[in-house]
C-alpha cells in the first residue's frame, strides 16, 4: 500500500533520536501495525515509551495516533490495497513486507533513467564497504555479463582516493551504503560526480539524497538481531535484469561470450 508517512519520515530521519529511528524503521516496514496496534503496543514492539510514540507522531505533523490511523484508513477507503500481516508466515513476514515496501519505492522512482544511465555509460564504477561490499560485488558480477567496463572499487589493499580521481566524465558511479557505513561515507559521496551517481542505501541513508542524482532506498527491518539483505539483493536482481533487457542483443552477446570462456576454462560445474 502507499504509506502516507513515508515521505514525512524521510524528511525528518536525519534528526531523529535512536528511539525515534526504531519507531521510524518499524513503521516504514510495517505500516499496517498503525491500524492493528495501540500506541502502547507500538511502544512495546519498539522498546520505547508510550510518550515517545506520541511525541514521534506529533513530530511527523499528526495530532495523535488517531489522526495518523485515520489517514491510513482514508487511503484504504480510496481503494489502495493494504496487506495485513500474516503471523503464520513467521520470520518471513517482515521480509515480505520489506520487499513490498521496496516495490513501492521503485514505483515512485525514476528507474528508467537509472537503467539507461547504467546501460549506456562508457564505464560503471561500483563502491561498497563492510556489509555493502558483497552487495556491490554481486552487482558487478551481474552487470559484467551484460556490458563491459564494470569496476568494483576500491581494489583489495588499495585506498579509494586514486580510484575516485580516475573516474572519467563518461563513467557512472554506484555507491552502496547500507547502515553501519564507514565513518567517512559522507565525505566520499561528496567527492563523487553528483550528476552521475546512484546511491543505494537503507532508510538511515536518506539524509545523503541531496548529494547524488539518484537514490534507491532498501527498507531494512530492525526487529531481528541480525540484518537480512534480502531486499538489497532483490534490488540488485531487479536492476541487473532491467539493464539486461534494455541492452537486448548486446547483453545477450556479452553473456554468451562470458559463458564461452567459462566453458573453455572449465571454471563452472
Image (tube, helix red, strand yellow):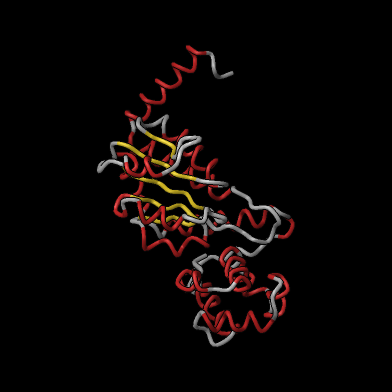
Task: Quadrant for the C terminus, please.
Answer: top right
| 40 to 235, vertically: above or below | below
Query: What residue do we see at 55% from left, 50% from top?
Result: 231
117 left or right, relative to 219:
left
Q: Report the front residue among 96 and 180.
A: 180
Q: Residue furthest top?
A: 264
Q: Report the front residue among 35 and 123.
A: 123
Query: What residue do we see at 33% from left, 39% from top?
Result: 119
Q: In the image, residue 41 lies at what x, y percent?
A: 72, 76
- Snapshot quadrant of residue 86: bottom right
Query: What residue do we see at 55% from left, 40% from top?
Result: 134
Q: Residue furthest left?
A: 169
119 left or right, relative to 102:
left
Viewer can see residue 68: yes
Q: In the image, residue 164 lies at what x, y percent?
A: 36, 44
| 164 to 99, vertically: above or below | above
| 116 to 73, vertically: above or below | above
Viewer can see residue 113: no
Q: In the image, residue 268 lies at what x, y percent?
A: 55, 19
Q: Report the front residue among 56 and 77.
A: 56
Q: Number of callouts in the render?
A: 0
Q: Report the front residue among 179 and 82.
A: 179
Q: In the image, residue 246 lies at what x, y percent?
A: 34, 39
- Snapshot quadrant of residue 25: bottom right
Amino acid at each position: 500500500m502507499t504509506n502516507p508517512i513515508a515521505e514525512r519520515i524521510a524528511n525528518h530521519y536525519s534528526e531523529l533520536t535512536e528511539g525515534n529511528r526504531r519507531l521510524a524503521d518499524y513503521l516504514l516496514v510495517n505500516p499496517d501495525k498503525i491500524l492493528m496496534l495501540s500506541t502502547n503496543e507500538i511502544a512495546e514492539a519498539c522498546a520505547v515509551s508510550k510518550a515517545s510514540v506520541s511525541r514521534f507522531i506529533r513530530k511527523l505533523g499528526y495530532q495523535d495516533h488517531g489522526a495518523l490511523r485515520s489517514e491510513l484508513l482514508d487511503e484504504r477507503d480510496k481503494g489502495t490495497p493494504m496487506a495485513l500481516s500474516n503471523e503464520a508466515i513467521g520470520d518471513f513476514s517482515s521480509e515480505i513486507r520489506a520487499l513490498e515496501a521496496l516495490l513501492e519505492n521503485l514505483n515512485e522512482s525514476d528507474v528508467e533513467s537509472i537503467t539507461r544511465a547504467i546501460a549506456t555509460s562508457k564505464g560503471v564504477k561500483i563502491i561498497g564497504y563492510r556489509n555493502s561490499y558483497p552487495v556491490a560485488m554481486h552487482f558487478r558480477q551481474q552487470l559484467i555479463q551484460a556490458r563491459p567496463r564494470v569496476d568494483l572499487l576500491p581494489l583489495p589493499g588499495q585506498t579509494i582516493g586514486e580510484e575516485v580521481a580516475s573516474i572519467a566524465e563518461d563513467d557512472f558511479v554506484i555507491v552502496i551504503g547500507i547502515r553501519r557505513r564507514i565513518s567517512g561515507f559522507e565525505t566520499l559521496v561528496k567527492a563523487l560526480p553528483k550528476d552521475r551517481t546512484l546511491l543505494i542505501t537503507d532508510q538511515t541513508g536518506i539524509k545523503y539524497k541531496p548529494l547524488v542524482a539518484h537514490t534507491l532506498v532498501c527498507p531494512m527491518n530492525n526487529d531481528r538481531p541480525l540484518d537480512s539483505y534480502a531486499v538489497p539483493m532483490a534490488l540488485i536482481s531487479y536492476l541487473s535484469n532491467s539493464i539486461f533487457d534494455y541492452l537486448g542483443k548486446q547483453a545477450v552477446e556479452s553473456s554468451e561470450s562470458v559463458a564461452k570462456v567459462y566453458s573453455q576454462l572449465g571454471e563452472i560445474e
